[in-house]
Amino acid sequence: MSDLRHGGRLAGLDVVRGVALIGVCAMNYHGYLINRGGQRGDGWTTVLDPWTGPLSTRFAATFVVVAGIGISLLTTDARRTRHPNTVMARRLTLVRRGVLLLAGGLVLDWVWPGTILFFYGGYFLVSALLITLADRWLILIGAASALSATAIRWWVMVRSDGGHETAWLLYGEAEANHSPRDLVLDLAVRGTHPLLPWLAFLTIGMVLGRRLPLAGPARATWAFGGVLAVVFGFGLEQTLGVDLVLRSTDPFDWALPYTLTAGGTAVVAVIAISALADRWPTALATRALAVTGRSTLTLYVLHALVFNLVVDWLGWIEPGSIWNAFLLALAYWIVAVMLANAWASRHEHGPLEAAYRAFSG
């Protein structure tokens, strides 16, 4: 990952964000149309299943890895100087961003249940405590997050087999009341992108971010490590002599093999996409996606509002074939890229990005 920058940003990472948001939109639209009666897919199209397919949550995991990279880049001065005032300033920035994303995520959740913004807020709050830790501690915390998620699943399985009630932990009540306990459990263990195990993706990104820009051999080493994690994760799924849930690579089982495969895939995606962006920095696609990647908060919120408008309010899109979802995602993304680039010709940041920075610094 070369030092290709725009306004102090690594442009390759913006391209990664732009590409990842394409996948997030497509998988989200597919899943939400299924919830409204659309087809889930069969045959080879099962690979596009938003809950069990091999692409499920991988785009979101890539976003979280990139978020970890961004946190390390933001806090470089605090980590290097260890000056108390600088460290505190960076911690407060992350806390403010976390609080804003938590609150914004709760609001967006009314129209887009399961939004990742709420969980992003949790990642930023936790990261405020981690920015000065050595790499080995970040690695240990990420590993503990992954193992804890698997351990919780094991505990639930054992308790359920013994006739004990466990739904309160992983699923909550039939009618969510958003009590403080529910919010904490949603954030930590039972939401769509909980800290256990998703904190592992964040810490991977934080460790990677401390090494940017990467030279060719280092880039190859990270890519190889990502591939190795994927192979090892799928190997565990096939060889572990334990209950299927504990060796599953399905996203919502939160087992260790899932975390390994999703994290490894995300690392490979970051390395490969940023390498292509660095190889062709002036290409139209690179420049357009980089600009789009600098407006992903705005475009993410907008994609939820557009879906509710054209599907729920206007009824222009029916929940039928899975291709309805992908055509809608494609149409949205073409327009979104055009709007983002038109906006960027006059403004440095997207609308929500500007407000976000004004509040959090």
Image (tube, rainbow, N blue to C red):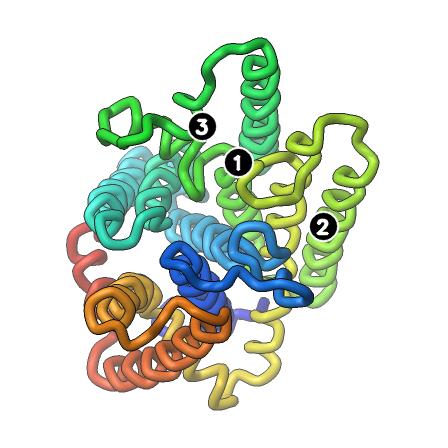
In contact (CB < 8 Å): disc 2 and disc 3:
no
Rendering coords of residue 292 (x, y %): 37, 75
In the picture, measured across the screen, residue 261 lies left or right of residue 72, that is right
- Residue 14 appears in the picture as rendered: no
Instruction: Identify the residue position indicated by label 1 in the image.
Output: 197
Amino acid type at circle 2 is Val
Label 3 CA crowd tier, 10 Å (few <14, some 14–19, many 20+)? some
Marks 2 and 3: which is nearer the front? 3
Whole-Å distance between the Cαs marked 2 and 3? Answer: 26 Å
Q: Secondary structure at mark 3?
A: helix
- First in residue order: circle 1 vs circle 2: 1
- The first of marks 1 and 3 along the sequence is 3
Q: From the viewer's perspective, is residue 154 above or below residue 225?
A: above
Please say if 266 is above or below 325.
above
Q: What residue did someone put label 2 on?
A: 230
The amino acid marked with disc number 3 is Leu
Dot 2: few (<14), some (14–19), or many (≥20) neighbours within 10 Å? Answer: many
> Disc 3 marks which residue?
170
Few, some or many C-alpha atoms within 10 Å of disc 1 (few <14, some 14-19, many ≥20)?
many
Seen at 67% across and 62% down, the residue is 219
N-terminal label among 2 and 3: 3
